[in-house]
Amino acid sequence: MGFETCGPNEAMVVSGCGHSRPLMVPGGRVWKWPIFQQLQRISLNTMTLKIHSKEVNTSKGVPISCIGVAQVKIQGQNQDMLANACMQFLGKSEHEIHNIALETLEGHQRAIMGNMTVEEIYQDRKKFAKHVFEVASSDLIQMGITVVSYTLKDVTDNEGYLAALGQTRTAQIHRDAKIGEAESRRDAGIKEAIANQDRMKVKYENDTEIAKAKRDYDLKKAAYDIEVQTKKAESELAYDLQAAISKQAIKEAEMQIKIEERAKQIQVQDQEILRREKELEAQVKKPAEAEKYRMETIAEAERNKVVLEAEADAESIRMKGEAQAFAIEARAKAEAEQMVKKADAWKDYQEAAMVDMVLSTLPKVAAEVAAPLATTRKITMVSSGKGDIGAAKLSGEVLDVVAKLPEMIEKLTGVDMSKAMKVKSR
């Protein structure tokens, strides 16, 4: 006992002890008992059959010969068909199976040829092959054989019928070709004329539409140009107007700046005058008061000296009896002299020293008044058309400030500088 195997192109059939009916195994392995069981093999290869049918009369009695090619094989995947094939061909060689299938197909091919005309077979080979395939398949299936494919390879005859049929057909084809060519030319001419007519019609219509479109375009363009030119003119006028307004605003702003600069300059000058007044007060009035205080102090010292001397004298003559009266008289005399000296000193200071001090200080005052002008980078002057302008104007203003000095000194000290200077000149 042992295993038996076979390839996918054959089938094994095991019969005998242990099986009520034969066991069919298409490609694989099977367990076999020697002596008690028998194993047979059947080929499942595809067989090519070349089917010749010579001098077969067609339905109209025209003898022709056909050669068909078929592919057949025993169907191993269907158990019923495999069983039928085993019943028919088991124990036969592949050549014997080939011959049986060939004879069957040849008979069916001859039968189909007898039921069709030469024209049908020659012109529609696919239809002929389909009939043969269907009729042969129904019979071969009963034997377990499947028709894989069938093709009509060639059709011939010994009478020249097919050649005549071909010539006739060729003549018909030539005739039909000429007729078709003439008709094509005719139709082409008609169609060309119609096409030319349609083309010219379309051309004229297109030209009309183009002219119409150009007219509309020119009209619209003219309207657009007018509108554009109008807008452009309005824009230019608006621009000029805006430019004029802007220039006017710039001029007003510049004038305002000049006015503000002039106001600032006036404020600076006022501040400078106040500063000069304070400076003069510090340089003239305060020294005068200090000198006055010095003279008063000297006079007071002299008075005290006289008083002390008088008191000393009075003390020395007190013993003589007239000390008190003499002291009173001396004190009164000293006070009187002191008052006279103070008056003279004050008068002399006002009349002479003050004049000298003012005259010696006057150039410094003028220089200090003009000092801010020396450090000024830019001066904008607005003229009303009357009076001096430029450097003459500035110089005049400096001299005006200096000319106010006597009046200011008179207010501070009570001394009339004009009279004092006249008296001094004498």
Image: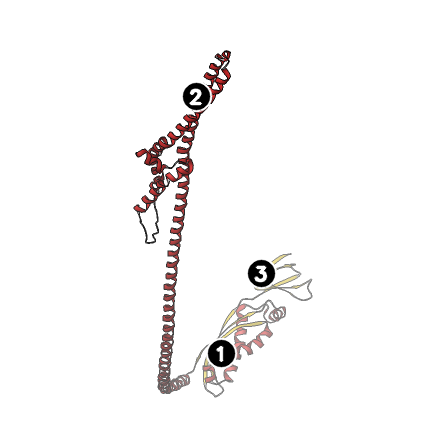
Residue in the foreground of this view, choosing between 145 and 394 = 394
Residue at the extreme top: 319
Q: Residues within 10 Å of mark 3 (few under 14, many from 20)?
A: some
Among the two numbered marks 2 and 1 on one chain, the one whose residue lies closer to the N terminus:
1
Describe the element under mark 1 as helix, strand or loop: helix
C-alpha span from label 3 to label 2: 170 Å
Mark 1 or mark 3, earlier in chain:
3
Residue position marked by numbered label 2 in the rendering: 302
| Residue 276 seen by the camera | no
Q: Which residue is mark 3?
A: 6
Q: Nearer the viewer, residue 59 or 31?
A: 59
Mark 1 is surrounded, within 10 Å at the Cα level, by few (under 14), some (14 to 19) or many (20 or more) other residues, namely few
Q: Position of residue 338 (x, y in %)?
A: 43, 24
Q: What kind of residue is marked 3?
A: Cys
Q: Nearer the viewer, residue 351 or 121?
A: 351
Depth check: give the residue in front, 58 or 404: 404
Q: Is residue 109 left or right of residue 247?
A: right
User: Which three-letter amino acid code belongs to the residue tagged 1?
Assistant: Lys
- Of badges 2 and 1, nearer the viewer stands 2
At numbered mark 3, what does the secondary structure look like: helix, strand or loop? Answer: strand
